[in-house]
Image (cartoon, rainbow, N blue to C red):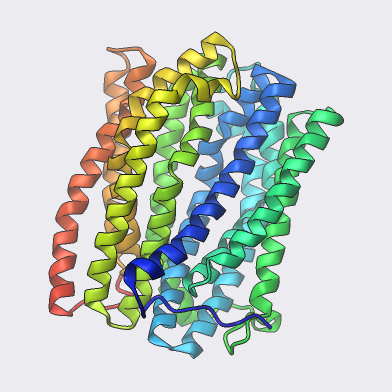
Amino acid sequence: MQRVPHSLTEGSIWKSMLLFAMPILLGNLFQQFYNTFDSWVVGRFLGDTALAAVSSSSHLIFLLVGFFNGMSMGAGVVIAQYFGARDYDSLKKAIHTDVALGLSAGLLLTALGVGFTPTILRWMDTPADVLPESISYFRLYFCGAVFVVMYNISQGILHALGDSRHPLYYLMFSTCVNVALDLLFVGVFHWGVGSAAVATTISQGISALLCCIHLLRINADYRLEPRAIRFHQESLGRIVRVGLPSGVQNSMISIANVVVQTCINGFGAAAMAGCGTYSKLEGFAFLPVVCFSQSLATFVGQNLGAKQYDRVKKGVRFGVGCCLIMAEIIGIGAYLLAPHLIRIFNDSPEVVDFGVRHMRTICLFYFLMSYSHCMAGVFRGAGRATVPMATMLVCWCFIRIGYITLALPHWPRLETVSWAYPITWLLSGIVFILCYQSLRRKLDAGTVRPLQA
């Protein structure tokens, strides 16, 4: 049996948050590494067209996976608040409902991904020379979508229980498997771009299996029991109430980013490869942001469940401050090293030029992006998922698409598209500042109700 996870409602705030956040950071680093390694292997062994097919994948994958990941975030908030309140009967029901939801969502996502991939890629104006390899990669990737969803579900449960170390260990192992299989399938056997997706699917399946085995072995009454996996109406209602806004938020932002990717596709395969490479590198830059956003959601959820309102405020100040500083240091480094970073994946002058121009327009504004993501985590942890949903839906979706639609015909340059990100990050940051003032007043008065949508 595995030991019971630790609570984040006791002890030093900075120490407990950092000890919880660092494994998440390392885990996200490994996850980003094996996603990026696919692009590196494909770019080096199969050329620019194959690299464009894989590198442009992130927005489409997140479009289809993001909704279900948002639902798992909602489940994590519910589980964290039950755990903080020591309501173990409700906690057990929420965990088994979450797993049932993940299995159902994974099968549905597989059907959607395999069936609609060609249609979506054509809507995105994917160039004809890239389209066949893009379809091959995406379809094989989504054949294993249930593993992606179940890993995120299982990882989210463990994080909500205060355990960020074991998901890290399992992800490290699966990353090593992915690297070995990429080199074997693409570099040695030359099986083509689809084999990179197969390698990723196998490695994700391993990490999902290990996380599920761990949940089966937790030494507590709320451990996972296969016979108890089913939907509990009250738990499902709470998960949907918090998770549905997060899922809608993820999907709508993804639609906006698909529109951005469609505009990039209009500049040709070199722009797709260069900007797609930046997207992989950007994933590394976002690691501390994702890390602290997830940590803040769990920290706020557990402490609100325990009614420790002053601890919530102190944790928010520490987590957001750390994230802003780390994100901007990374942004400055990315600006200075942009040409060298793009050349790691492809040394074509045209690809490097597009990638550098895109990166240098965006990366100095990472502090704006980090603030919005962290505050979204705070509001999700407080059970107010509609706040980040509405904010990002307006700023990161409607305004982003509107800006590109109006600006690009007048300034048909890549930088016009790139500026869509800093502009909308700034707007969402302003909204979050105003919204947090209202939440803070309720924390001061002790009137925050956990699990309020």
Which residue is depicted at the point 33% across and 33% down? 421
Which residue is depicted at the point 35% across and 29% down? 362
> Residue 86 falls in which quadrant of the image?
bottom left
Q: Is residue 342 above or below residue 391?
A: above
Q: Is residue 359 above or below residue 352?
A: below
45 left or right of 276? right
Q: In which quadrant will I find the C terminus?
A: bottom left
Q: Is residue 347 above or below residue 417?
A: above
362 left or right of 115? left
Q: In which quadrant will I find the N terminus?
A: bottom right
Question: Which of the two residues, 286 or 339, is positioned nearer the viewer here?
Answer: 339
Which residue is depicted at the point 18% across and 73% down? 443
Q: How many marks?
A: 0
Question: Which of the two residues, 102 or 329, is positioned nearer the viewer here?
Answer: 329
Residue 241 visible, this angle: no
Image location (x, y in percent) of residue 337: 44, 24
Image location (x, y in percent) of residue 63: 50, 43
Image location (x, y in percent) of residue 16: 40, 70
> Residue 401 falls in which quadrant of the image?
top left
Image location (x, y in percent) of residue 285: 44, 39
Q: Please, which residue is most extreme toward the right here?
A: 189
Residue 67 visible, this angle: yes
Q: Is residue 150 above or below residue 231?
A: above
Which residue is depicted at the point 27% across and 27% down? 403
105 left or right of 186? left
> Residue 48 falls in which quadrant of the image?
top right
